[in-house]
Amino acid sequence: MAGELQRPVRETVTPSVLQKVVWAGANLTSFPQAAAALKMLADIGLSAKQIRRVTEQVGRDRLEERRQSVAEFRNKPLMQRLTPPQGVAAPQLGVVMMDGGRYQRRDHFGEKDYDGSHWKEDKVGIVLHMQSAVQDSDPHPEFPAWLARAEVVREIASLGTAESEQDAVGEALCPTAEDGPAASATAAEPTAEEHDGFAEWSPQWISREVIASSECGSDFAHHLECVAWQQGVIAAPRMAFVADGARVNWTIHKQHFSQMTGILDLMHALSYAYRAAQAIDASGKTSRRWAEAIWQGRVEEVIAELRAALEQDERPADQQEPLQRALTYYEHHRARMNYPRYRREGLPLTSSHIESTIKRINIRMKGSEKFFGQETGETLLQLRADSLCTSQPLPTFWPRWFAKQNGANRYRKLAA
């Protein structure tokens, strides 16, 4: 029976205690830390192994419930998938973002095609209810001074080193992030006055639903689409899909969210300009000019200058490489870089919300000494994502889970 827990431990575990155990196992940095915290804070004496087993078992049932929900959504006629569920109101502005993270796996050790890398990709997506005003003209046509500061340029330029067309995990620096004026506490932050200027026109976050999985891109895409439907986002009068340049992001956008305005994360767009400009002009004048052109929606001018620079055959290969990468990037994504229009329509310019969400997922999943089997990793990704959702799905999941147990007191037992 789904959710049945085997072999009792020395103490009786009530439903309330069981929920605490699973929360600790899914949200603290490790199972040993969960065991220590439960003992210190709640006098619950379970070992790390016991916490792992019960967290995995409950997590598997939560996964099964989620997969069933996605399967039911996929079986709906197209018109029903484009209409929100009964009683769900569409937001003023609906936004979908996605990106990839990493965690270490051990289940592939010894396989024939094992390449020696422990790191495997997980995908994270968020569905946001947001609100913003639509403007008659660009509310901020001038390039922000703080984005031209030397320390900011260095930090943004580093994003381009991490991204390829297949995989991109960057640090967005944006004053619309929920935790403050930037997605990370670095030198690359706007001042309080500069942040207030952005807040006047930037979309405001209202609610967030989070999904995380190491399943294939197709399964993840259907899951993300299902959550967008459940939240009424697919019927919002204004919709946006925001991501960096990774190919999988825009494949999913094309196949599942083509009705949404596609927006390339501004910070990754700037990163390519900064790195390419550094290869030909150490003064910073070229990088400032290209960044300003991108901010103002004049990416074709940057493309033309990059082409001209590449035609100089005497340029060494180490200078040509960032120029070619930037040119390819902008040619591929130029249709997603109309930032003046996005500001007028009150749409987000960056993927800062998904970047900060991935950091929260990584608190549990990522670490030099953390290795998971695929099944354990998937259950933890599911439960960790649940805990970050505004809707808080676990409190409503628990009554359904307890109702399925065999016998009146089966839920009182944990794996030994």
Image (tube, grey):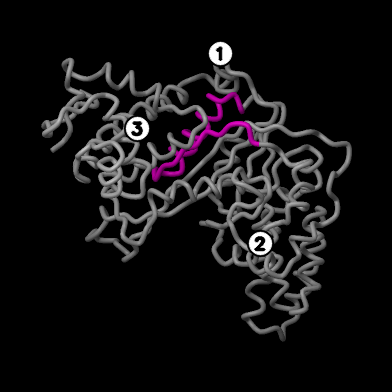
Identify the secondary structure beneath mark 3.
helix
Label drawn at residue 395: none
Q: Could you tell me how far apart the alpha carbons at marks 3 and 1 are, in whole angstroms?
A: 24 Å
Q: Could you tell me how far apart the alpha carbons at marks 3 and 2 are, in whole angstroms?
A: 39 Å
- From the image, tell me which residue sits under label 1: 86
Q: Nearer the viewer, residue 216 or 311?
A: 216
Residue at 23 percent of width and 25 percent of height: 14
- In the image, is residue 225 part of the stretch drawn in magenta? yes
Hey, which quadrant is residue 114 in on the image? bottom left
- In the image, is residue 18 part of the stretch drawn in magenta? no
**Disc 1 vs disc 2: Cβ atoms closer than 8 Å?**
no
Q: Could you tell me how far apart the alpha carbons at marks 1 and 2 are, in whole angstroms?
A: 44 Å
Q: Nearer the viewer, residue 146 or 251?
A: 146
Q: Amino acid at mark 3?
A: Leu
- From the image, tell me which residue sits under label 3: 63
Q: Which residues are magenta?
A: 205-233
Q: Amino acid at mark 2?
A: Ala
Residue 231 x, y percent position in the rendering: 56, 25
